Amino acid sequence: MKTSKEKAQRLFLCWFFICISEKREMHMEAVTNILTQIQSVVWGPPTLILLIGTGLYFTIRLHLLQIIKLPRAMKAIFEKEQGEGDVSAFGSLCTTLAATIGTGSIVGVATALRLGGPGAMFWMWVSAFVGMATKYAEGLLAVKYRSLDENGHIAGGPMYYIQNGLGQKWIWLAKTFALFGSITALLGCGTFPQVNAITESVHDSFGTPVWISGLIITIAVAAVILGGIGSISKVAEFVVPFMAGFYIFGSLIIIILNREMIPQTFSNIFYSAFHPTAMLGGAAGTGIISVMTSMRTGVARGVYTNEAGLGSSPIVIAAAKSNSCVRQGLIAMTSVFFTTIITCTMTGIVILTSGMLNRTDLSGSTLANAAYNSSLPAGIGTYLITIGIIFFSFTTIIGWSYYGERCMVYLTNSVKCIRPFKTAYLIAITLAPFLSLEPIWLLADITNALMAFPNLIGLLGLRNVVIDETHTFFHQKTPHTEISLEKSESENETVICNG
């Protein structure tokens, strides 16, 4: 028999923990509201204009290169090419895809459709179309202005083409990019959303405690990233083709099964992109999704999925063994095609044709799970989504570790920062499973925008270099060559390639 005192103590403890839980929810709601306001500012009209405008500028000046030269770009992926670098051109592309085909391809698309309606899918396509031209420019400049660090490894990315292309007076902009790049790797795209997506998905599917999944992820990531870019590239070359093919094949089966809904789905996508629409899943009149909300959500999630304009991919593109910066730019732009145009479209069409977007109780991975399960028997959809999220997110985590590492090397001008950064990165992975989903995605959107600004300014400042190099490559009569890379004797000195 429990005494009255023991009962009172138990009641007090229950009341205490309930109060803590309620206060935590109130604090998280306040944090979410603040992040939402910041996100609406950083992803407001100026950012959208700069992002879409930059891609549109290169699309026009390069004469629709992303369409006309796409077949040549696909062919270049598999060509054997000689040149200096840390990884093969194919390995560089796989590492880029590893970092981009993450939770954004599944959870990000589901979240975009929930927040922005079907029209968000259209704006994701727009961001991808012009983003291919942007990614081409990023890849070209990354190889053109790359150099070597003190260990003889490739050092490249926006911070290098901003400083070495625009001049020393722009070093502040290069450092700004590197700073936000490091933050994004630690707190944005690289860790929190990816780890949270894996642990939640595994917990929902198999009942595995999130701390166990988080611990396994931490150990697995450590085993890969401690081996450097070579190890990351080898894992990416093996995993990326398998995981993408597996997910696309499963999605195609569902789309074929729901083929009668495809015409109406595309009609809803194009209509919602240009007209305010009722919020799906709620009672009539409970909410209206504006065109601006649809556009902002679609473009933001589009950038999250393909990273065009963000400036992250050029960091690993620079490490490719290549004797032509133009050819590497062509290869780089295919990553946008594979991520958003193919993979994300698969997710979006499956969700929209399933009718699950009409349910208010579903969002993120649960919405994707319900959509895929609605057409596949015996919970096969759950396994497809779970396996997809695990592989997509894991490869994103290891890819972004390299991005953050190179940004820190630039900021400190020393490779001695690499191990402390990797330690901090692994700590962030360990903490990620215990964080709330919505603030995580908002924080990722915010850090993406802050990272994109200096990169886009650098791209526009070097626009004539991109155009001249492209014109020379496609109209030259003699074979192009590249000046060999030499170890820098001064801070961030570069050796420039021809072609």
Image (cartoon, helix red, strand yellow):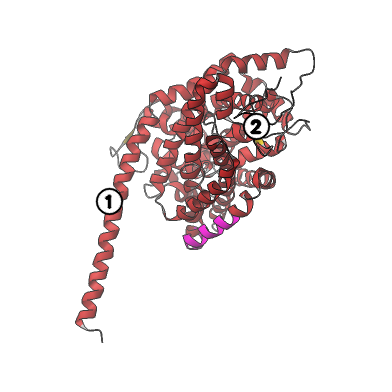
For the view shown, which residue lies furthest in the front direction?
A: 489
Residue 407 drawn above or below residue 49 = below
Main SS of the magenta part reads helix
Quadrant where the N terminus lies?
bottom left
Which label sits in the foreground, 2 or 1?
2
What span is in magenta?
Answer: 205-220
Residue 20: name its quadrant. Answer: bottom left
Q: Which residue is drawn at 44% across and 35% down?
A: 118
Residue 429 drawn above or below residue 13 = above
- Across and down, in percent, residue 368 comes to 49, 47
Disc 2 marks which residue?
318
Marks 2 and 1 close (CB-CB < 8 Å): no
Say if the magenta span includes residue 201: no
Q: In this view, does 181 lie to the left or right of 436?
A: right
Say if the magenta span includes residue 213: yes
Local crowd size for mark 2, using a 10 Å CA cut-off: few (<14), some (14–19), many (≥20): many
- Across and down, in percent, residue 72 comes to 71, 25
Residue 5 drawn above or below residue 337 = below
Q: Residue at x 61, y 49 (%)?
A: 225
Local crowd size for mark 1, using a 10 Å CA cut-off: few (<14), some (14–19), many (≥20): few
Q: Residue at x 65, y 37 (%)?
A: 150
- Across and down, in percent, residue 4 comes to 19, 81
- Toward the viewer: 352 or 71? 71
Q: How far apart are marks 2 and 1 (CA)?
A: 45 Å
Q: Is mark 1 on a helix, strand or loop?
A: helix
Ranked by sequence position, the earlier of labels 2 and 1 is 1
- Toward the viewer: 56 or 278? 56
Query: What amino acid is found at the position of numbered circle 1 in the picture?
Result: Met
- Toward the viewer: 291 or 403? 403
Q: Which mark is residue 26?
A: 1
Q: Is mark 2 on a helix, strand or loop?
A: loop
